[in-house]
Amino acid sequence: MSNSLSEADVLKVASLSRLKLSEAEVETLGIQMGSVLKYIAMLDELDTESIEPMAHAIEISNVFREDQLQVSLPREKALSNAPQTDGNYFLVPAIL
């Protein structure tokens, strides 16, 4: 494997990432990304036949608590510091 990615490969990744790169950055990133891929390719040399697939590198488990009904904050108090309300809901600018 080469020590650098082609200019076309770097420009494609930059396009997908919505990055505008200078010529110097394209060359530098090509070398850096190539080094990363070369390092990752070393993993292909490992014998993983006897290792079971796993979703996480360490043993973890979710710790969920039981849902318990509790007294909520009164609506008036929750809305009291809001910049804008209609009396029942927070008013926020439309996003779409």
Image (cartoon, rainbow, N blue to C red):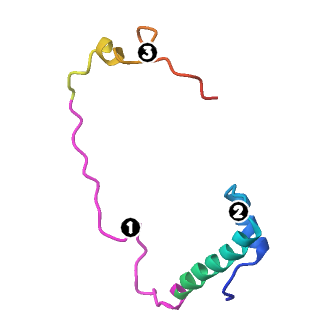
In the rendered structure, which segment of residues is drawn in magenta?
A: 43-68
- Taking the image as shown, residue 93 lies to the left or right of residue 78, namely right
In the rendered structure, which disc, 1 or 2, sits on the residue that comes first in sequence? 2
Element on which disc 2 rests:
helix
Q: Which mark is residue 89?
A: 3
Q: CA distance from mark 1 to mark 2?
A: 29 Å
Q: CA distance from mark 3 to mark 2?
A: 42 Å
**Residue at the extreme right of the image, as rendered:** 8
Q: Nearer the viewer, residue 54 or 31?
A: 31
Is 50 covered by the magenta stretch? yes
User: Is 4 above or below relative to 29?
Assistant: below
Callout 3 touching callout 2 (CB < 8 Å):
no
User: Is 86 above or below relative to 19?
Assistant: above
Q: Residues within 10 Å of mark 3 (few under 14, many from 20)?
A: few
Is 17 covered by the magenta stretch? no
Element on which disc 1 rests:
loop
Q: Residue under circle 2?
A: 14
In the rendered structure, which disc, 3 or 1, sits on the residue that comes first in sequence? 1
Q: Could you tell me which residue is drawn at 25 percent across and 51 percent down?
A: 63
Q: CA distance from mark 3 to mark 1?
A: 41 Å
Q: Residue under circle 1?
A: 56
Identify which amino acid the numbered label 2 is placed on: Ala
Identify which amino acid the numbered label 3 is placed on: Tyr
